[in-house]
């Protein structure tokens, strides 16, 4: 409850600052094109795929590449861009409390708004055996897992919703956007089929994360069992001794050869487990964000998930 109250107060202060500075140096650069604002990389990339080679929109991602997702706070300039945008795509869920406060304070009648969590059937975070439980979980109950895009099937649904929002803002190119979306959805379908084949041919169906576990929708989609140090939206990075010991024993007992960690992880817990068990630490991309180098080199959701495909093959064999 305290965290939520802080979000409300912060958002209110930022809104006031942004609205007072709309004519000043904090104004966003205006290209004259309609603006699509996405809070995180998956939404940005899905929108990018829908737009394709068209140049009818300015596309913007608020979360800077390489930055820590869980500590993001919108700047006054970010709020100005949300206020002036034509299409706004955000995750939804508890961590986006600041979004709801901003949207509740501005005129959104001219904005097409897509919440990715509204596009799919959501799952609650769960505390599996051995996982470190947070005090907030005991007080409020598990929150909904927000990493809905980690299932390629969900990514297809989200892409369709984003396509619809963009097309409603530019009816003249609707057929182009819809064709781009369907081509991309077909590529996501091919990726989905490869994951299913990998799981079907694997020698085991259990994976271990030595960190936060941000891929609940992925494991649910493909019928995988998992063990992890923390739930996906945990603020923790240091596991207690009991959690680490449990995961070491699990890796040893089941002869698991790979321990995963997500992008932007300090890898400490995963490396500790591997040093005591002989497993290999490997990155599994949640695609929540990516490094500045990856962004600059043109990495996409599909390229990052294709890396995950190879990592999963190693983990299941």
Image (spheres, rainbow, N blue to C red):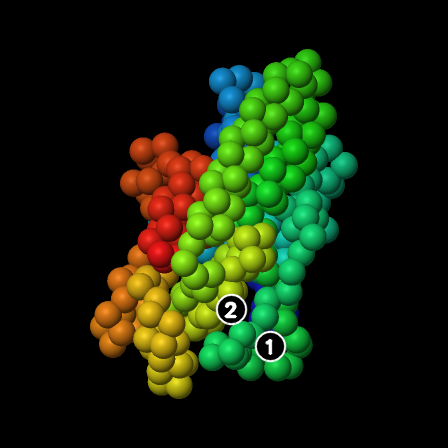
Task: Using residue 278 as the reference point, say whether residue 43 is left or right of it.
Answer: right
User: Label 1: which residue?
Assistant: 137
* Mark 2 and mark 1 residues within 8 Å of each other at the beta carbon: yes
Q: Nearer the viewer, residue 199 or 230?
A: 199
* Residue 70 x/y as whole percent: 47, 60
In the picture, the quarter occupied by the N terminus is bottom right
The reply to whether residue 284 is visible in this rendering is: no
| 88 in relation to 140, above or below | above
* Residue 60 x/y as whole percent: 50, 35
Seen at 48% across and 77% down, the residue is 131
Rendered image: mark on residue 201: none
10 Å crowding of disc 2: few (<14), some (14-19), many (20+) = many
Residue 277, quarter of picture: bottom left
Residue 292, quarter of picture: top left
User: Label 2: which residue?
Assistant: 231
Secondary structure of residue under mark 1: helix
């Amino acid at each position: 409850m305290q965290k939520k109250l802080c979000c409300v107060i912060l958002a209110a202060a930022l809104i006031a600052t942004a609205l007072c500075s709309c004519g000043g140096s904090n104004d966003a650069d205006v290209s004259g094109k309609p603006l699509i604002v996405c809070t995180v990389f998956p939404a940005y990339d899905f929108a990018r795929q829908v737009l394709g080679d068209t140049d009818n929109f300015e596309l913007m991602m608020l979360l800077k590449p390489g930055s820590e997702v869980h500590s993001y706070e919108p700047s006054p300039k970010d709020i100005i861009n949300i206020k002036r945008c034509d299409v706004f795509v955000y995750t939804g869920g508890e961590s986006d409390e600041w979004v709801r406060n901003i949207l509740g304070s501005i005129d959104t009648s001219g904005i097409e708004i897509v919440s990715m969590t509204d596009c799919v059937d959501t799952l609650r975070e769960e505390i599996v055996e051995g996982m470190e439980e947070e005090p907030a979980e005991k007080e409020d109950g598990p929150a909904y897992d927000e990493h809905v895009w980690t299932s390629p099937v969900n990514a297809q649904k989200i892409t369709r919703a984003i396509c619809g929002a963009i097309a409603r803002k530019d009816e003249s190119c609707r057929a182009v956007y819809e064709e781009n979306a369907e081509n991309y959805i077909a590529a996501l379908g091919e990726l989905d089929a490869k994951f299913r084949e990998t799981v079907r041919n694997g020698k085991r169906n259990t994976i271990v994360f030595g960190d936060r576990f941000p891929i609940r929708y992925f494991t649910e989609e493909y019928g995988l069992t998992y063990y992890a140090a923390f739930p996906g939206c945990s603020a923790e990075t240091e596991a207690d001794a009991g959690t680490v010991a449990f995961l070491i024993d699990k890796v040893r007992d089941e002869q698991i050869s790979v321990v995963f960690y997500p992008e932007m992880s300090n890898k400490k817990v995963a490396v500790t487990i591997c040093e005591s068990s002989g497993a290999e630490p490997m990155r599994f991309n949640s695609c929540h964000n990516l490094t500045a180098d990856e962004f600059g080199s043109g990495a996409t959701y599909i390229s990052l998930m294709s890396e995950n495909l190879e990592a999963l093959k190693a983990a299941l064999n």
